Amino acid sequence: MFQKTTMAAAITIATSVLLVACGGSNGNNNGAVVGGGTTPTTTLLGSEQKPALSAANFNASLGASASGQAILSVAGQPKCDVSISHIEYSTIGGAGEATTASGALMVPTGSDPSCTGKRPVVLYAHGTTTSKGFNMASLTTDPTNAAAGESTLVAATFAAQGYIVVAPNYAGYDTSTLAYHPYVNYKQQSQEMIDALKAGRAALPKDAAGTTTSDSGKLFVTGYSEGGYVAMAALKAMDAAHIPVTAGAPMSGPYSLEAYGDAIFYGNTPIGGTVFAPLLTTSYQKAYSNIYNITSDAYTSAYAANIDTLLPTTLSQDDLFTTGKLPQLALFQSVAGSSGGQVDPITGADLSTSQFSFGFDPSSYLINTSYRAAYLKDAAANPDGAVPTLTASPLPATAPQHPLRKAFALNDLRGYVPSMPVLMCGGNQDPTVFFAPNAQLMAGILGNIAGAGAPVAFALLDVDTTSKAPVGFSSAGLSPSVTTSMKAVAQQAQTGFGTILGATKDAAIEAAKVDPKVVAAANAAGQAAYVKVLTAGGTQADAAAAAKAAGTAVVTAAATSAATAAIASSYHGSLVPPFCTSAARAFFQQY
C-alpha cells in the first residue's frame, strides 16, 4: 500500500536544512543552454507592427468592463501609448530540432517621461494554454484570441507604465512550425526565452538620436503559471550563460516538478490536470522518447488514440471535454470500497471525504492505473526529498527509475540559487499549481541557503490571507529599504486579493439563491418536509417551520457549493494573476 500524502507534508518548509553551492547549480543537471545564450541560428525572421494602443483608449476600454476595472485598480491608469509588433524568430524544439516561434514586442511611447528614451525590458512568459492560435501580439487585432486576457494584463501592468515587453508565444503556438509544445522542458524553454529576448531587442526601433524608446540595459524576467516555471528556468539559464538580469519574479509556477508530480500521483489531483497531462507527456516523449512505448501504456483506451497529437489545438477547452477528447476533471480511477463509497485503488483513501475526489472516476478517467502504480512504486523506492515526507535535503530523488519521474527530476529547478534578486508570488490555496511544494518549498530552500551565509536575495509573497494557514510575506538578503517597500506592497496585494475573493464568493452565493434549479429543489424539499410533519400529526405551524428549514438547507448547501466552485475555478487563472503581476512590477521598481 502506498502512502497517501497531503499538502500539509510540504508546509513546514522552514524546518528543513539544506546547503548547496551558489552560482546556479542544481541537484540535477537540467542541461546547459548554448554558450553565450543563443542558438547558433537564432534569427529575427520578421516583425509586423500592429495597430497601436493609445493610453486614453486603453484606459477607456479597461474602464468599460468589470474585469478591466479590476486590472486598473492594481495596475494603475495607463501612462503610455503602446506600440505592438508581432515578431517571429528561430529557436529549437524539445529534441533540439530547429524550429520557429513568435511573440509580442510591446513598446511604450508618448509624452510622459516614463514612456520614452531608455526604458527597462520585461521578458514575460505566459501561462498554460491549449489554444494553437495563442498570440500575445493580438491585443489590438483579435479580442477573441485566447491570449487576450493575459496580454491585456501584461500591457496594462508593464508596457503602459513604461516597460518594453518581450512576450514569446512559445514554440508550438501561433505561427510556429513545431507540431507540439515543449511543455515545462527546462532546456528548450529557457533557450527560447533567450532567443525571444534577442529577437525582441533586434526588432526595437533604432534611433541614434535617442528620441524614441530604447533599451536601457535593465532586464526583468517574469511569468505566470507555466510561465512562472519558464521564468525561473530562464533566470537559471541566463545565470549559467552570464547574461545580466536585473531582477526576476516567477509567479505561481511548478518549479519543483518531481515533488509536484509525486503529490499528484499520490492522489492530490489539480484542477486542470487532464490538460496538463497530455501536454507534458508529449513534450517529454519528444525530448526523451521513453515516457511510453505506445500512448495506451499511459492513457486509458477511451483517450489514448491520437492524444500525442491532440495539443495544442484549434478546439476550445470546452470542446475538448464535450467531444470526449479528454475527461474534464478525472485523472485517476476510483473503485467501490467495502463501505459502498468510492476509494483510491492504490492508496486506499476514502474519496468521499477527500477534497481531491473530483480527480477520480470509476470509468471515465485519463491515466492508466497500472502506469500510476508503476510511478508510485518508484516514488516509494526512490522518494523525493519533500513529498510525501519533508526531509533535511528536500531535493529531487537522486536516482528515480520511472521514465516520467526521471523527466520530472531532470527538469526540476530546486537547488538553483539566483544571482539576482527574485520575488516568488502566488496564493496558498491554489488548486491548480500547489503553493506548498512549489513556491513555498523553493523559498524554504533559498532561505536555508541565505541562513548559511550565502549571498541570496529573494522574497516570497502569498497574496491569500483568508486561509487557515496563510504564509504571508518573507524575505532574505534584500536591502532594508526594499524589504520595507515590499512589505507595504504585500499588505496592499493581500487586502485587494481578500476583497476580490470575497466578492467572487458573494456573487456565486447570490446567483445560487435565484438559480431556478436550486429554487425548485428548495421548494420540493420544503413541500416534502411540510407533508411529513402533517402526516406525523404535527400542526400547520410546525409543518411550515419544517418546510422553511428544509428549503433553507437546500439553498445554503447549493450556495456553499457554488461559492467553493467559483473560487476554485477562478483562483489560479483569474484571481491571483493581477495581484502577483502588480507586485512583480513593484519589485522591479526597486531596481
Image (cartoon, helix red, strand yellow):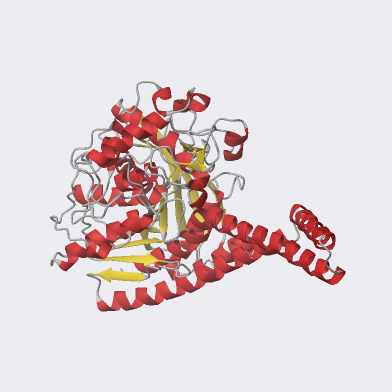
Q: In the orientation shown, which residue stands out farthest toward the right?
A: 540
Q: In this view, does 415 lie above or below 111?
A: above
Residue 248, horizontal then vertical, whole percent: 31, 59
Do we see residue 209 in this rendering?
Answer: no
Residue at 31 percent of width and 30 percent of height:
287
The quadrant in which residue 291 appears is top left
Count the numbered circles shown.
Answer: 0
46 left or right, relative to 548: left
Q: Which of 55 and 552 is in front in this view?
A: 552
Q: Which of 319 and 141 is in front in this view?
A: 319
Q: Which of 430 and 391 is in front in this view?
A: 391
437 left or right, relative to 87: left
Residue 44, horizontal then vertical, whole percent: 37, 39
Q: Which of 22 and 342 is in front in this view?
A: 342
Residue 542, horizontal then vertical, whole percent: 81, 70
Q: Quadrant of the C terminus?
A: bottom left
The quadrant in which residue 482 appears is bottom left
Do we see residue 463 in this rendering?
Answer: yes
Residue 436, horizontal then vertical, whole percent: 35, 57
Q: Quadrant of the N terminus?
A: top left
The quadrant in which residue 530 appears is bottom right
Q: In the orientation shown, which residue stands out farthest toward the front?
A: 537
Residue at 55 percent of width and 65 percent of height:
501
